Image (cartoon, helix red, strand yellow):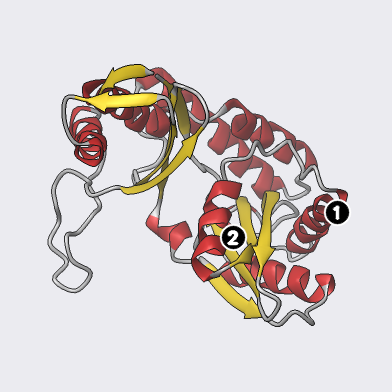
Amino acid sequence: MRTIDVNEITNLVEKLCIKSNYELPCDIRNSFVKGKENEKSPLGREIFDEMIKNCDLAAEKRVPVCQDTGFATIFIEIGQDVHLTGGDFEQAVQEGVRRGYINGYLRKSIVSDPLERINTDDNTPAIIHTKIVAGEDIKIIVAPKGGGSENMSAVKMFTPAATKETIINWIAETVINAGSNPCPPVIVGVGLGGTVEKAAYLSKVALLRSVDKSSENPVYAEMEKEIVKKINASGVGPQGLGGTVTALSCAIEPYACHIASLPCAVSIGCHVTRHAEGKI
């Protein structure tokens, strides 16, 4: 049994909130370079250049890579042999978010009630997904999600009779119809199976996968490839201004489902699909 004070969680969450908004993962920056090589539109290539410059300047100057510093979505894996002391776990996480957004000079975008729309002034509460795993460590991923891309999310309850082609076409059309709203080139996360809430959760998890990795299942790997191909054939292009690269990648996370249903959820990540990871 390992004892961990919740203050360690607060400190790590604070650091990850700042890091995720200042520094893009290397695989995403590399996808910009590759995207520029594949982009046939002169304007599109210029946009990729600006994306790369923006990414590098944010890390160098220690400023947010995007003015929308997002809804803090946090994935936490807690080892079952961990004993937490010193306070409430969820309060510790929320305090880390509060400190990170205040001390990192990150825009506060969260309102306390969906109808009253009063800003909480510290970007809390965050969305917290907790999973108990084997071991005695705590793994934390902070993934800020901007409003523009989040608003393009979609869920469809297919019947079990739906074909792969039908599902592929719906996913591609969802992204294409989003146009410039999610700030393309985008990263597409798909949750397939489970229940409606499980599919939505998995679509967010899918956005955490490295953009240069395909599904280990050849069936889903081929679907991912076909979805990207269809999206890029749309001509939406970088920032919706036309071009050949609208999607950088697609990741599908499948799960078991009921014999009567086939849920599918799509989460679209903008070109700055941010996340940072740490371990205690």
Q: Is disc 2 surrounded by few (<14), some (14 to 19) or many (20+) residues within 10 Å?
A: many
Q: Amino acid at mark 2?
A: Gly
Dot 2 lies on which element?
helix
Could you tell me if residue 71 is visible in this image?
no
Q: Say above or below: 162 vs 254.
A: below
Q: Please tell me which residue is depicted at 16% across the width and 31% down the height of the picture.
A: 87
CB atoms of marks 1 and 2 within 8 Å: no
On-image quarter of the N terminus: top left
Residue 41 image position (x, y, % from top left)? 73, 50
Q: Please tell me which residue is depicted at 30% across the width and 19% down the height of the picture.
A: 4
Q: Is disc 1 surrounded by few (<14), some (14 to 19) or many (20+) residues within 10 Å?
A: few
Residue 40 image position (x, y, % from top left)? 78, 48
Q: Please tell me which residue is depicted at 45% across the width and 21% down the height of the picture.
A: 136
Decide if residue 217 is on the left or right side of residue 76.
right
Q: CA distance from mark 1 to mark 2?
A: 26 Å
Q: Amino acid at mark 1?
A: Glu
Q: Considering depth in this image, is 61 or 149 the residue closer to the camera?
A: 149
Q: Say above or below: 96 vs 149.
A: above
Could you tell me if residue 131 is visible in this image?
yes
Q: What residue is shown with label 1? A: 222
Q: Considering depth in this image, is 125 or 87 the residue closer to the camera?
A: 87
Decide if residue 33 is on the left or right side of residue 71.
right
Q: What residue is shown with label 2? A: 240
- The image quadrant that residue 90 belongs to is top left
